[in-house]
Amino acid sequence: MGASWEGFAIEELIAAANSRDIYFWATHAGSELDLLLFNKGRRLGFEIKYADAPRTTKSMRIAKEDLQLDRLYIIYPGPECYDLDTDITVLPLQDIPLLFKEE
């Protein structure tokens, strides 16, 4: 189920962002980020987790620092949006369009 969920969420992110400036990122040491997206001058990272209460990981912290992310989002199937740490936010899948809404 996790792989299916990840693929679906990534498709939703790509559609909402309407950008070609999207990447997968990984290091030789094993750290990775499901999606790196550049949007309006911001570096945004996305991790997709099929979990009720996602947590930060060492890999997320490494990606945040190495890529100098403005914000890292953890996309999950739950209903609540909340911060886990400075610049790390858990975001429900249905809220993805709000990230790219024209201001």
Image (cartoon, grey):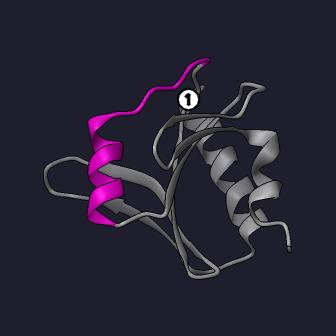
Residue sitting at x 58%, y 27%: 50
Picture coordinates of residue 21, whole percent (x, y) = 56, 80
Picture coordinates of residue 90, whole percent (x, y) = 60, 36
Magenta residue check for 59: yes
Farthest-out residue, front: 86
Picture coordinates of residue 80, whole percent (x, y) = 74, 27
Where 19 falls versus 78 (above or below)? below
Q: Which residue is mark 1?
A: 2
Farthest-out residue, top: 52
At numbered mark 1, what does the secondary structure look like: helix, strand or loop? helix
Magenta residue check for 83: no
Residue sitting at x 51%, y 57%: 71
Farthest-out residue, right: 102
- Drawn side of residue 40 relative to residue 95, left or right: left
Residue sitting at x 67%, y 46%: 9
* Mark 1: few/some/many CA within 10 Å (<14, 14-19, 20+): few
Residue sitting at x 33%, y 66%: 67
Where 6 falls versus 52 (above or below)? below
- The C terminus is located in which quarter? bottom right
Please state the total of marks drawn on the protein image: 1
Where 99 falls versus 41 (above or below)? above
- Drawn side of residue 40 relative to residue 60, left or right: right
Picture coordinates of residue 15, whole percent (x, y) = 77, 65
Taking depth in this image into account, of 70 and 13 the one nearest to the observer is: 70
Look at the image and give the residue range highlighted in magenta.
Answer: 52-67
Taking depth in this image into account, of 83 and 78 the one nearest to the observer is: 83
- The N terminus is located in which quarter? top right
- Drawn side of residue 28 relative to residue 93, left or right: left
